[in-house]
Amino acid sequence: MLRTRLTDLLGIDYPIIQGGMAWVADAALAAAVSEAGGLGLIAAGAAPSEAVRQEIRRARTLTGKPFGVNVMLLSPYADEIISTVIEEGVGVVTTGAGSPGKYMEALKSKGIKVLPVASSVALGLRLERMGADAVIAEGCEAGGHIGESTTMALVPQMADALGVPVVAAGGIADGRGMAAAFCLGAEGVQCGTCFLVADECGIHPVYKQKVLKAGDCDTVVTGRSSGRPVRSIKTPFTRQYLDMEKAGASQDELEAAAAGSLRKAVKDGDVESGTFMAGQIAGLLKKEAKAGEIIACMAAEAERTLSSALNRWADKEACDVRP
């Protein structure tokens, strides 16, 4: 079994975190991942705190294992959600879309582990200084809101710069990707897209089919003109949005066009006006499976891959060319 500082930190069997995907990562999916030995996350998104509280309590009826809550810090309910997480005794919080600094003391004083997402080494270092227990280094291969660096480039630089465990995210959906992340210095992985096709994931069937039918070039990044890039599967909506960007649409016009688009994809399967967020690795996914099967297969394949690579290069001398 793959044991790292991350598994010890979070009290989990496998160093695999399920991404906190807004409108997607609910109690059912989080509990299924946690039951299988990973860390399931409930996504708070822009939901009110009481809705998040209900999901936390529902997860507790489904699993007795550790799970966490992902908090989008730009949410107007962020303060209340952090309070709810503390009141409900959730053990792990991941954060994105903002700085967790103002909440760090309150969370850590209750023994809650804080794992923020970072898309650059500079941000990772700042988060470590704030008190982050680990940092999720997310590359631009990921679905949803992304940065500029690839996972391959970001993870080793982050691992060299930080003292806390680094979790690789973006473009990882099987054991080969997990093994590669370990070789780059990560001590765990966060995966989102591969859990979109989990049996326990409650997204619209059209959404699942969009992921399963996607090829390696079937995602696109919108929002670069506003400085808020988002990776999604290509649809009529993404084409329309890109046309608006090219035509110089204002930020207000772009926000109006995108309002509710993720919900329309997740709940309605609306290909005309929905945003089907998914990473570039979607092209690797060919079938639905239980969350437990996804985790078990990923972990087993990672161990086989690492062992095979070690045997393949066992007679080669290591050469450290780093200055």
Image (spheres, grey):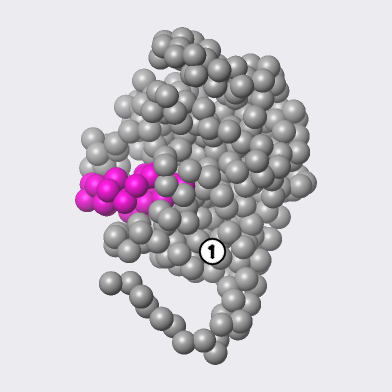
Q: Quadrant of the C terminus?
A: bottom left
Q: Residue furthest front?
A: 247
> Is 130 within the magenta?
yes
Q: Horizontal and vertical percent for residue 143?
A: 55, 38
Q: Horizontal and vertical percent for residue 110?
A: 30, 45
Q: Is residue 203 visible?
A: yes
Q: Nearer the viewer, residue 51 or 228?
A: 228
Identified at 58% across, 41% down, the residue is 279
| Occupied quadrant, residue 228 | top left
Left or right, 121 with reference to 290: left
Up-down relation of residue 70 to residue 79 (above or below)? below
Up-down relation of residue 41 to residue 37 (above or below)? above
Up-down relation of residue 309 to residue 180 (above or below)? below
Q: Which residues are magenta?
A: 115-139
* Callout 1 secondary element: helix
| Occupied quadrant, residue 295 | bottom right
Identified at 42% across, 24% down, the residue is 225
Q: Horizontal and vertical percent for residue 187?
A: 45, 63
> Is 270 within the magenta?
no
Q: Amino acid at mark 1?
A: Ala
Q: Nearer the viewer, residue 321 or 287?
A: 321
Q: Is residue 112 visible?
A: no
Identified at 53% across, 43% down, the residue is 142
Left or right, 216 with reference to 191: right
